[in-house]
Image (cartoon, rainbow, N blue to C red):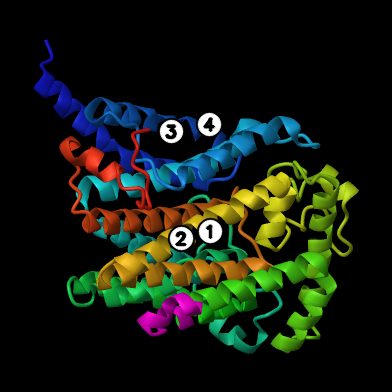
Amino acid sequence: MMTVTNLRLLLTYALRLEPIILLFTLFAYWYSSPSRDSWLWILYLLLIVFMARFLLYQRFWTSSNYDELVFGFIALCGINLFAAPYPTRGLLMLHRPLLGIALIIFCIEFARSRLDHKRLLQATILGGLILGIVALTATEWSEGKSLPIEWLLRSIPQITTYPGVEGLFNPNEIAGAMTWLITPLIGLFFYFRLQQRAWAILALAGGTIMLFALLLGQSLSAFIGVLVGFGILFSPRRFWHYAVGMAISLILLIQILIMLDPNAATRIASQVSGRENLISLEHRALLWQSALAMLSDHGLTGVGMNLYRDFYVRGDYPVPGFDWWTAVHAHNEILQIGADLGFPGIFLFIAIYAMAGYLLYYTWRNGDSQAQAIAVALSSGIVAHLIYGLTDAIPLWDRFAFIYWWMLGLVGAQAYLVYAERVKYSTSDERANAYMADSTSPNNLSET
C-alpha cells in the first residue's frame, strides 16, 4: 500500500518530467506536417505534470499577467477554426501555440520553485549556440544578395541532413530567429563573465557565430534590428527606458505607415537603405497590400490561421509576380497575424508584447543590477526582432516561433524573481497569502 510519503515522492518525480516532455515536444513539433502529426500527443503528457503539481501544491501552474492574454489567444484560434472563411487545417494549428504557452508556464514555474533562473539562461545560451552553428552550415546563401562574398560562402561546408530541416534554410527566415537571441547572448556574456566564465565564453561564442551568419545572410531588416538591439544593450543603464521607448515609438510609426500606405513605406525604405534598384522592397509592398485586402474583407476573423499562402486564398488575393506557393507570408508580423486572425488577433498580439514590456520595465525599476542587466539583454532581443518584423515575419505557426514564447517566459521568470526578492517571498504555503495580497505584483499568483 502506497504511503503519503511515497505518493509525494512519486509526484515530485512526475514534476521532473516537465523539461523532458517539453524537450521531446520541441523536437517533434520542429518537423513539418505530416511528420509531426502523429506526435501531437506528446504535448498532452504535460497533463500529468499539472496534476502532480496540483496534488502537491494545490495549483496547476503559477498564474501570471500573461494568462488572460495567451489563453485568450488560444481561444481566438479555436474560434477561428470554425469562423474562418477558408477551410483550415483543424486542431493541428493549435499545437505550436499551446507548446509556446507551456514554455511560458515552465519558465515562471521554474523560477518560483527554485527562486533562480540561471538554468533557463544557460539553456538559452546553448540554444543560441546551436542556432548559430546551424545557421552557418545549413543556410541557402544563393538568394541574389551574396555575390560580393561568394568566395567566402563557397568555403563554408553545408549540411543538409539536420533533423527536420529538409534541405537548407532561407537566410531571411533564420535571420529572424537569430534577431531574438544575438544581443541577449552578448548581454549574458557580461552577466556570467564574473561568476561562471565557461558560460560567458559559450554566450559570446553563440552570439558571435550568429552575428557572423547574419552578416553572411544579408537580411537588411534583421541587421538593422540587431544594430538597434546593440544600441539598447550598451546604452547607459539610466537611459535604458528612453532608448527602448524611442525604438518602440519609431517601430509604431513605421508600422502605421506600412498599414496606411505600403508604397510610401517602401519608397522611404529604399531611399534610406540605398537599395533603390532591388525589387525586394517593391515586392514587400505587394505582399502587404494583399494582407491588407484580406484584413479589409475579413476584419473579424482574417482568412484563417496560416492561410496566407493557401491556394484558394491566393486565388482571391493574388500577389503580382508571385506564384501561390512562393508568397509564403505577409512579410510583416502585424499584417501576418491580421491576415490569420483579423483585428482581434492584432490586438492580442500587441497586448502580449505590451505585457512583456511592462514586466521588463518592472524588473528594471525594482531589480538589482543583475536583474536590470537581464531586462536590458532581453529587451534588446525583443526590440531587434520587432524591427525585423516590420519587413519580414516568423508567423506564430512557424517552427521557429518557440523562441518568441521562450523569450516571453524568460521575461516573466525574471519579473517573478524581482518581486519575490522585493517582498522576501518564500514558496511555502504559509506565506502565500501575504504575497498574493500585494496588488502591485507583476505576476498574479492566485492558484490556477
Spatial CA span between label 4 and label 1: 36 Å
Q: Earlier in the sequence, mark 2 or mark 4?
A: 4
Give the class, few, some or many, for how many residues have Cα within 10 Å of label 3's Cα (few <14, many ≥20): some
- Whether residue 186 sits left or right of residue 6 in the image: it is right
Q: Are marks 3 and 4 in contact (CB under 8 Å)?
A: no
Q: Classify 10 Å Cα crowding around label 1: few (below 14), some (14-19), many (20 and above).
A: few
The answer to if 234 sits in the magenta stretch is: yes
Instruction: Tell which residue pokes out farthest to the top in this image.
Output: 1
Mark 3 against mark 2, which lies toward the viewer? 2
Would you say residue 60 sits in the magenta stretch? Answer: no
Left/right of residue 142 with respect to residue 314 in the rendered view: left
Q: Earlier in the sequence, mark 4 or mark 1?
A: 4
Location of residue 334 (image quadrant): bottom right
Q: Residue 348: percent from the left, percent from the top?
A: 60, 49
Q: Which residue is mark 3?
A: 42
Instruction: Find numbered disc 1 in the image and state the secondary structure of the residue it sits on.
Output: helix
Cα–Cα span, label 3 and label 4: 9 Å
Secondary structure predominantly adopted by residues drawn in magenta: helix
Return the residue at label 1.
354
The region drawn magenta spans 231-243
Q: Secondary structure at mark 4?
A: helix
* Quadrant of the drawing holding the C terminus: top left
Q: Nearer the viewer, residue 188 or 258?
A: 258
Count of picture labels: 4
Q: Looking at the picture, which amino acid does disc 3 mark?
A: Ile
The reply, left or right, for residue 441 in relation to residue 29 is left
**Gap between marks 2 and 1 measured at Cα:** 6 Å
**Considering depth in this image, is 101 or 282 the residue closer to the camera?**
101
The numbered dot on residue 38 is 4
Q: Helix or strand or loop: what does disc 3 sit on?
A: helix
Q: Which residue is mark 2?
A: 358
